[in-house]
Amino acid sequence: MQSKLYILAFMLAGLVVVSVFFVMDSSPKNNLANAEPAFNSTEAYLLPISEPSYFPIYNPNPPAGGEKPVLDAKSGLIYDTRSGRILFDKNSRAKLPIASLTKIMSAVIVIENLNPKDVVTVPKETLKVDTEKQSLYLGEEITVENLLKLMLIESSNDAAYTLAYYTSVKGINFVDKMNEKARLLNMNDSNFLDSAGLNDDAYSTSEDLIKLVKYSLKYDVIWQILTEKSVIIKSTDGKIEHNVESTDQLLGVIPDIFGGKTGNTDGALGCMILVVDIPDKNDKLISIVLGSQDRFGDTKKLIDWAKSAYRWE
């Protein structure tokens, strides 16, 4: 009798297991035979092959040869904006005086704190500040916009100091603003001491200047001004006329220049920033040269090499 009970219990248990199996098998959640796969390998294979995640692509055998340029500069760098990559680097973290490259930062401060249509009266404190060249006149009335052009195109130190003076009249410390902006941009190896870059105790690095240039690209007006070879700028009453010539000797020499800024002091030697478009690729090259006896030659070497050693298609 007891053995019959065991057999009956065993059969009932078997029926329960079979029932559970069929219930689970018919559940939508577990019907693996009919379920869509989480990743369909056939569909993935048929998708169009995507392009590499970024250009440019290094060409190990460029037409002009693969050797990196030899620079006279103490520091040099070339940077691709689209990929965010440094393509060439020579002592890019060296802290060096940057002379009038400082004026890119000054232009940013002017745009962010002053009205371009404001009229400024030139004071005696901002005339012939480099003891060599006077580019403004005592009592001349000129707009902030035109001072910005003078500062960027012909690298006028008088214009840079006049803009800083006018900013101080409005209760803003210009140099403090420059260093505050540098900290916000994580330019941690930079220190600014004047709006023109005359003080060679100030310093920056090629790497930090890339951060500044990238930020300044949001202001088209800066780079539009920096493509001008020559302009005529007048005082607000039209009585004083300034014939302004660019200090950038590479304008018209290198194609597709988006803008450039030069710098030179006895301590800094020759310095240069140049931004060049890569046509139809939504990309730019930024070249930085610091402490060079041949800033234009070094810059051209960097741009020519990058265009030869890398391809964008």
Image (cartoon, rainbow, N blue to C red):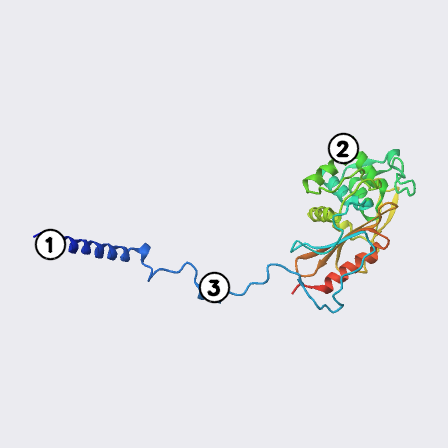
Three-letter amino acid code at disc 1? Ser
- Residue positioned 55% across, 63% down in the render: 50
Who comes first in sequence, dot 2 or dot 1?
Answer: 1
Q: Mark 1 or mark 3, which is nearer the start of the sequence?
A: 1
Is residue 303 shown left or right of residue 18? right
Q: Which mark is residue 199?
A: none
Q: Is residue 309 visible?
A: yes
Looking at the image, is mark 2 or mark 3 earlier in the sequence?
A: 3
Place of residue 131 in the rendered image (x, y in percent of width and height, measured from the top left):
92, 40
Separation (CA) of disc 2 from disc 1: 102 Å
Q: Residue at x 74, y 69 (%)?
A: 63
Amino acid at pointer 3: Ala
At a point 85% along the width and 55% down the height, the residue shown is 294
Q: Which residue is mark 3?
A: 44
Find numbered disc 1 in the image and state the secondary structure of the residue it sits on.
helix
Determine which residue is flagged by label 2. Answer: 173
Drawn side of residue 162 relative to residue 179, left or right: right
Asked if the residues shown at circle 3 and circle 1 are in contact, with their CB atoms under 8 angstroms apart, the answer is no
Q: Secondary structure at mark 3?
A: helix
Residues at marks 2 and 3, CA–CA distance in whole angstroms: 59 Å
Is 51 on the left-hand or right-hand side of 174?
A: left
| Residue labelled with disc 1 | 3
| Residue 268 vertical placement versus 71 (above, below) | above
